[in-house]
Image (cartoon, grey):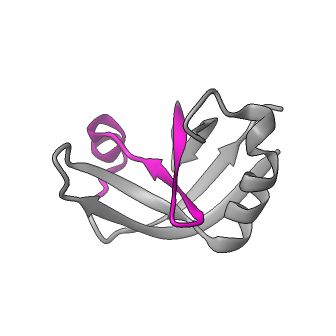
Amino acid sequence: MNFEFNNKIWFWKGPAPWFFVTVPAEPSRDLKDISELVTYGWGVIPVHVRIGNTEWETSLFPKDDRYLVPIKASIRKAENLEEGDNVTVRLEVRL
């Protein structure tokens, strides 16, 4: 199952600071529908992600009826990304 969307990178200033892109409402609903088939606990969903020319494996985190794509430093550096940048995210969920 594949998804593609655009959204902004944002910074979470919690006890473990991190950058994320929020999956929009419609794809989040679709992901929720399949979550029981693919989650390995706590509602997280393993995915293959692509932003620009960079691809990696990570897990989506559920939050407030949406999912969050974590964007680690090496990805931001490779694609020259900063907080507030609008990015195209491609997700692949392997069923």
Q: x%, y% of residue 32?
A: 73, 54
Q: Is residue 94 above or below residue 81?
A: above
Q: x%, y% of residue 19?
A: 31, 53
Q: In screen coordinates, is 34 left or right of 60? A: right
Q: Is residue 62 magenta?
A: yes
Q: x%, y% of residue 27?
A: 72, 63
Which residue is located at x 65 percent, y 72 percent? 25
Question: Magenta residues?
Answer: 58-82
Foreground: 90 or 66? 66
Q: Is residue 50 magenta?
A: no
Q: Quadrant of the N terminus?
A: top right
Q: In screen coordinates, is 60 left or right of 82? A: right
Q: Residue 59 appears in which quarter of the rendering? A: top right
Q: In screen coordinates, is 66 left or right of 29? A: left
Which residue is located at x 57 percent, y 63 percent? 66
Q: Most extreme residue toward the front, as rendered?
A: 42
Q: Residue 81 appears in which quarter of the rendering? A: bottom left
Which residue is located at x 32 percent, y 65 percent? 10
Q: x%, y% of residue 68?
A: 49, 54
Q: Is residue 24 visible?
A: yes
